[in-house]
Amino acid sequence: ADLPQAEVSFKDKASEKAGDDSVYIFQFSANADMEQGTFFTVVFPQAANYHFSGTLSCGAITINSYKIVGTLKCTAYDEHTVVIEGVEEDIAAGISVGFYLPVKNPPQGGLIDTIDLQVKQKDTSTILHRDNSMAGLTILPGTMKVKQAQGAGVVLAENKMTDYTLTMTTENAVPKNGVIRVSFPAAYLSVEKYIIRSGLRDESDTVPLNVEL
């Protein structure tokens, strides 16, 4: 059976950036009773680079004056799957319920693909209710600290060739095959070449670092 109105959201809008420690809110209802001992599984898309491990400090939330009865325990089944247990009383059909889950956002920004939310029967792997098309979240890009300095001895004047040095520190790791894109204002006529001085290197002699100007 499906899970009507299943959705996920950020608990705090201030934690939407890539790499942030965040909390996600899951809420849903089932079109049949969920018995005591029922448990939930949340499967995040592998391509999004979520990484879960150990026990997570999750908990039930109150929706329309109702809250799941029991102390929820959330455990990472693998790096992208979390199991939520601890339902101590039956949940009637049609009642909206929810829980929060601490999550470290992926290291890259973008729209996260669909998340798979499953309701499973006690002590089994049987799926009673499921929504495997729940829209994911939009993760904002992480920030980058950039220091811009002109080269020594440059004469400040129009229509002169000028060397600039960009020193940057990113909040998150730049992944393999990542691209560094540098955009200059329209008033700059051309950028003839760039030199990597430190902190980055070509992948190999035949695969140079990918920088777009």
Image (tube, rainbow, N blue to C red):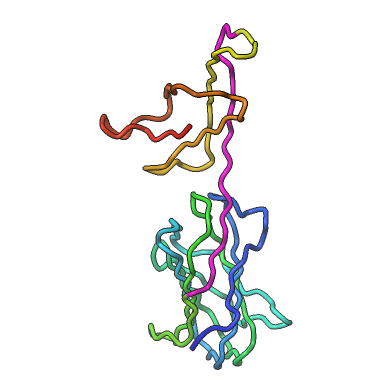
In this view, 110 is above or below 188: below
Q: Residue at x 43, y 60 (%)?
A: 53
Of the pair 191 and 3, the residue shown nearer to us: 191
Q: Residue furthest right?
A: 65
Place residue 205 in its image quadrant.
Answer: top left
Q: How many marks?
A: 0
Q: Residue at x 49, y 79 (%)?
A: 131
- Position in image of residue 11 (x %, y %): 65, 63
Of the pair 131 and 182, the residue shown nearer to us: 182
- Position in image of residue 197 (x %, y %): 43, 21
Q: Residue at x 58, y 33 (%)?
A: 145
Q: Is residue 65 left or right of residue 146?
A: right
In this view, 128 is above or below 17: below
- Position in image of residue 43 (x %, y %): 45, 70
Q: Residue furthest left?
A: 206
Indicate whether residue 187 is drawn in magenta.
no
Q: Residue at x 53, y 65 (%)?
A: 136
- Position in image of residue 5 (x %, y %): 60, 80
In this view, 206 is above or below 53: above
In this view, 142 is above or below 78: above
The magenta-colored residue range is 133-154
Indicate whether residue 135 is drawn in magenta.
yes
